Image (tube, rainbow, N blue to C red):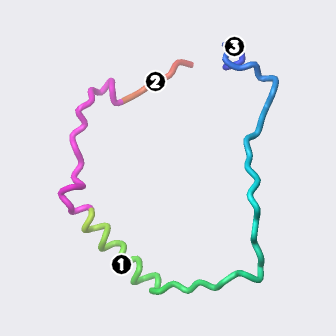
Amino acid sequence: MCIGRGMVRGHTQTIDWVPIKGNASMDRLELKVPEADLTSHLHKIQHISAMDKASPLRQSKENKASKEEQSISATK
């Protein structure tokens, strides 16, 4: 569609890249052990989430846009 409208020619493709030096080694892998077990971590996160939802700062605001402004459409 862009070619048909003359916005681009479409005869050349380029790729933007940056060489990144890798420094991966299987000898440098480290075992990471969580500080807390999964169950207690999930309970802590659920508690924080519940407190956040109850916060007056998180109450949803009224959408002041008209129904037409709340949706978009495109032609075929």
Residue at 56% in and 86% down: 33
Mark 2 touches mark 3? (CB < 8 Å): no
Q: Secondary structure at mark 3?
A: loop
Q: Which residue is mark 2?
A: 73
1 or 3: mark nearer the eye: 3
User: Magenta segment: does it hold 54?
Assistant: yes
The magenta stretch spans which residues?
53-70
Label 1: which secondary element: helix
Which label sits in the foreground, 2 or 3?
Answer: 3
Q: CA distance from mark 2 to mark 3?
A: 24 Å
Q: Amino acid at mark 2?
A: Ser
Q: Is residue 60 left or right of residue 25?
A: left
In the foreground, 8 or 46 = 8
For the residues labelled 1 and 2, the Cα–Cα distance comes to 43 Å
**Badge 3 is on which residue?**
6
Q: Which residue is mark 1?
A: 43
Quadrant of the frame with the N terminus: top right
Q: Residue at x 36, y 73 (%)?
A: 45
Q: Position of residue 10 (x, y in %)?
A: 77, 23
Q: Compute the Cα span from label 1 to label 3.
A: 58 Å
**Type of the residue with mark 3:** Gly
Task: Please determine whether, in this image, residue 56 is positioned above or below residue 23.
Answer: above
Describe residue 34's horizontal placement relative to residue 29 as left or right: left
Quarter location, residue 49: bottom left
Badge 3 density bin: few <14, some 14–19, many ≥20, Cα 10 Å: few
Q: Residue furthest top?
A: 5
Please provide percent x and percent y for residue 51. Answer: 25, 68
Precedes in sequence: disc 1 or disc 3: 3
Q: Is residue 12 left or right of residue 43?
A: right
Amino acid on which disc 1 is placed:
His
Q: Earlier in the sequence, mark 2 or mark 3?
A: 3
